[in-house]
Image (tube, rainbow, N blue to C red):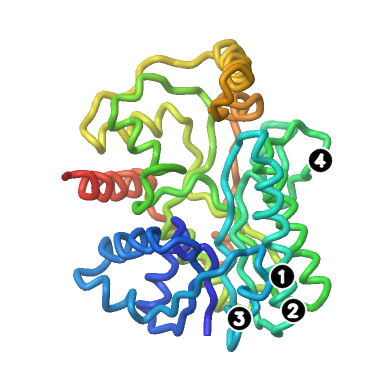
Amino acid sequence: MILVTGGTGLVGSHLLYKLASNNKKVRAIYRSEQKLDIVKRVFSYYSNTPDTLFNTIEWVKADLLNIPELNEAFSAITHVYHCAAFVSFEPDKYTLLKRTNIKGTANIVNLCLTHNIEKLCYVSSIAALGKSLTNAPITEETHWNPEDDNNVYAITKYGAEMEVWRGTQEGLDAVVVNPGVILGGGIWSHGSGSLFKRVNNHLKYYTTGVTGFVDVRDVVNIMVALMDSDIKNDGFIVVAENWNYKRFLQTLAKALGVVAPKKEIKNWQAEIGWRLDWLRNKLTGSRRVLSKQLAQTINSESIYSNEKITTALHYKWIDLEDSISNTARQFMADNSE
């Protein structure tokens, strides 16, 4: 039996459909009953009878920090996809990020070892990769510098990866995927889904940064292919294409049929912006929207190489424009009422 953590998240929900449609016996961990509706919504993108496959999944309520609950979820499991994570770039969420991403992953790794799990697939992020000191693309070998001004999310995803690699030293077979910005329907309140919502609401501003994007279906297909392969104890960047944010937002606006953002946020404006955001947080206690590190990221150019995974699996990627159009159709369908 296969165990999927984070089953109600973006990657987890699309992965569950892939596994269930392949007649795999699957158990999935969830934390909130309300979020199960997300999974049904995702299944409806692929099938006219989403409940049929949804009902084949064995759902277990568990917390990554609750060992007895997790131990029960691991009963009779042979393979694990660890998709669960907490995503935030707010500096004051660092403690929660460490607990969920690092400690939670350590618990998963330890239980994999205890239960003699055959293979683990961990969903990391390009945030956990090092930064290129030249114009060369970032690869799996790019050095992570702990002395850099890394954002809190990146620090904890890197720490989580270290737990997985520690597990491999203790006898666990594992693969790690580092996706870029993942595009796919189902969750519109946060993550990349919130960009569709903001552009649809006539977002006016764009930045000049560059990063890697990938369709959630590519992420899921690669994860399953790696788990079914003989590849083990290795990590792979999962990025289809590198685009600047201006091009991405303009393409997204066109797919939604709205006016594209036209005002560029300059570096100096972003620098002022994060300082004002910090001051607002101190004076009012409101949540941070723009941290120092995030302000630097949105205007930085980071190019990621997908050569390693493309070669290993002879993989053909979904065109990014097709991905944006497909996700835009799902957004409009979900928000048509």
Disc 3, disc 1: CB below 8 Å? Answer: no
Q: What kind of element bears circle 4? A: loop
Q: Which residue is mark 4?
A: 146
x%, y% of residue 292? 65, 24
Q: Amino acid at mark 1?
A: Val
Give the residue drawn at x 27%, y 73%. 51
Give the residue drawn at x 65%, y 43%. 153
Q: Which residue is mark 2?
A: 113
Mark 2 or mark 4: which is in front? 2
Disc 2, disc 1: CB below 8 Å? Answer: yes
Q: Is residue 28 left or right of residue 117?
A: left
Q: Amino acid at mark 2?
A: Leu
Q: CA distance from mark 1 to mark 4?
A: 23 Å
Q: CA distance from mark 4 to mark 3?
A: 36 Å
Q: Amino acid at mark 3?
A: Glu
What is the number of the mark on residue 109?
A: 1
Q: Which residue is mark 3?
A: 72
Q: Amino acid at mark 4?
A: Pro
| Above or below: residue 173 compared with residue 280 | below
x%, y% of residue 89? 60, 37
